[in-house]
């Protein structure tokens, strides 16, 4: 049985209880959210990790870190360093997006080393296998698709991105409503080219029931991919994007009926004033399924700083109801990310997620900020460092400061506002809150 099936039968599982301990949530509430399809538990039945990761309504906003080889960079050791950094700095999940080198070996090492759930994009391995065996990355069949999905599930992958919304009908809409950037999803572009070459329906759509069989068997969560997401803010919320979203909503219902957990992937490049509308549309068209967004990036011009662009969009999106943020690194649009890029991306997304959790009235998030405020009032530098989202950087900055008076910092020195107000409003006077 899957976690969704247990929830439909009102049975609390040990995984649900573990997730509730992490979230500070009554188990009955999580059971209800899973039952309604508003939350999912990311954990393959056979993947040996300490705890599951719960994503969805009423839960802390989660952050995903992408890693994996490229056709130009394929050192396994480098990707394992990125995995370690992702975990150290608080990523809730990782996705292996490898397309270079030995994909199975890479995935095996990540699954073995990861203490958090692991996701993949199976079409990458499908295309790479076709290229290696037949010299043509589009030379794959529906059987090849299902075989790769089965093999990855059997290895322990916790969630799949499947590009089932890139259909023949939705491609027609794209052709009639041209964009600046047609399809920027790597998986979406592969499927679109496969459909165009063979004039056949997308196997991820046509054989969706067979995919559900595999997902059910291992309790793999299906992340229905936004293969037609906008890659430019000028293309945001267009007919193509919304047509795919409607298709994903229909597939989400089919998955839930088969007791398969499902979440929806979202855009992409979206201006700030369209984010709330996008979240609302996803929740309506996809029946309240958890929403997993890439950023979103709120401008197209921040090359080298897209982790900031994505954090701005991610904070707004999660504050409006998105459940899961896929990080973006400073290397986005430019090159394969380094270990430092991964660190910057994870931290930026965690800041965005935390900011949104305050909006969502998450008790743990509110308590964390309150504790930091009290530590600042007390000028307790060690506690401030400990409570920082990146204690190492906070400690380095503090150590570099070397104030004349260790009670303050070098920004204000003797004019420290907090210290001055201690004299003006001593403890116990009106205006003071402990």
Image (cartoon, rainbow, N blue to C red):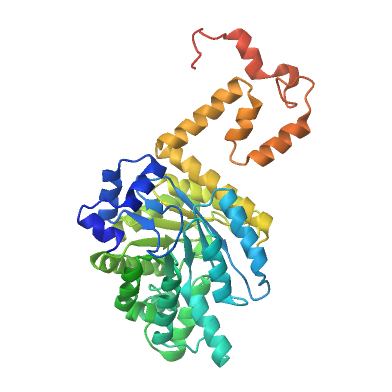
Instruction: Measuring from the top left, give residue 295's x and y in whole percent.
Output: 52, 55
With respect to residue 17, does 415 lie above or below?
A: above
- Residue for point 39% across, 56% down: 291
The quadrant of the rendering that contains the N terminus is bottom left
Q: Residue furthest left?
A: 9
- Residue for point 33% across, 55% down: 283
- Residue for point 39% across, 52% down: 54
- Of residues 373 and 384, which is closer to you in this image? 384
How many marks can you see?
0
Is residue 261 in view from this perspective?
yes
Dividing the picture into quadrants, the one containing residue 105 is bottom right
Left or right, 253 with reference to 199: left
Q: Residue furthest bottom?
A: 134
Instruction: Measuring from the top left, give residue 145's x and y in whole percent.
Output: 42, 81
With respect to residue 426, does 304 lie above or below?
A: below
Left or right, 260 with reference to 408: left
Instruction: Measuring from the top left, give residue 200's x and y in whole percent.
Output: 38, 88
Instruction: Measuring from the top left, give residue 202's x and y in whole percent.
Output: 39, 81
With respect to residue 242, does 30 lie above or below?
A: above
With respect to residue 421, does 270 lie above or below?
A: below
Dividing the picture into quadrants, the one containing residue 319 is top left
Left or right, 416 with reference to 109: right
Is residue 176 in view from this perspective?
no
């Amino acid at each position: 049985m899957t976690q969704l099936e247990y929830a439909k039968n009102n049975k609390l599982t040990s995984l649900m209880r573990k997730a509730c301990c992490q979230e500070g949530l009554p188990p009955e509430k999580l059971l209800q959210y899973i039952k309604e399809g508003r939350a999912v538990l990311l954990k393959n039945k056979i993947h040996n990790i300490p705890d599951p990761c719960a994503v969805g309504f009423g839960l802390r906003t989660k952050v995903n870190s992408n890693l994996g080889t490229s056709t130009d960079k394929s050192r396994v050791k480098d990707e394992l360093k990125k995995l370690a950094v992702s975990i150290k700095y608080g990523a809730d999940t990782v996705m292996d997006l490898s397309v270079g080198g030995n994909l199975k070996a890479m995935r095996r090492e990540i699954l073995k080393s990861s203490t958090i759930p692991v996701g993949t994009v199976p079409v990458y391995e499908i295309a790479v296998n076709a290229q290696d065996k037949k010299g043509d990355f589009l030379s794959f069949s529906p059987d090849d698709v299902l075989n790769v999905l089965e093999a990855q599930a059997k290895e322990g992958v916790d969630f799949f991105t499947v590009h089932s919304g890139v259909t023949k009908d939705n491609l027609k809409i794209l052709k009639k409503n041209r964009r600046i950037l047609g399809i920027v999803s790597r998986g979406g572009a592969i499927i679109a080219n496969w459909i165009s070459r063979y004039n056949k329906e997308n196997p991820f759509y046509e054989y969706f029931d067979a995919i559900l069989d595999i997902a059910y068997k291992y309790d793999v969560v299906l992340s229905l991919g936004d293969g037609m997401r906008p890659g430019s803010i000028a293309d945001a919320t267009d007919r193509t994007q919304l047509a795919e979203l409607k298709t994903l909503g229909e597939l989400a219902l089919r998955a839930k009926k088969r007791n398969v957990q499902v979440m929806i992937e979202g855009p992409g490049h979206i201006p700030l004033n369209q984010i709330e509308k996008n979240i609302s549309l996803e929740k309506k068209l996809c029946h309240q399924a958890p929403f997993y967004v890439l950023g979103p990036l709120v401008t197209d011009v921040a090359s080298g700083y897209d982790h900031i662009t994505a954090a701005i969009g991610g904070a707004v999106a999660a504050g409006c109801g998105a459940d899961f943020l896929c990080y973006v690194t400073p290397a986005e649009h430019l090159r394969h990310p380094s270990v430092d890029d991964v660190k910057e991306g994870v931290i930026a997304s965690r800041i965005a997620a935390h900011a949104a959790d305050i909006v969502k009235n998450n008790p743990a998030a509110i308590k964390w900020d309150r504790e930091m405020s009290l530590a600042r009032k007390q000028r307790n530098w060690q506690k401030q460092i400990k409570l920082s989202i990146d204690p190492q950087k906070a400690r380095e900055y503090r150590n570099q400061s070397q104030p004349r008076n260790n009670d303050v910092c070098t920004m204000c020195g003797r004019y420290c506002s907090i210290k001055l107000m201690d004299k003006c409003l001593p403890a116990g006077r009106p205006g003071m809150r402990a």
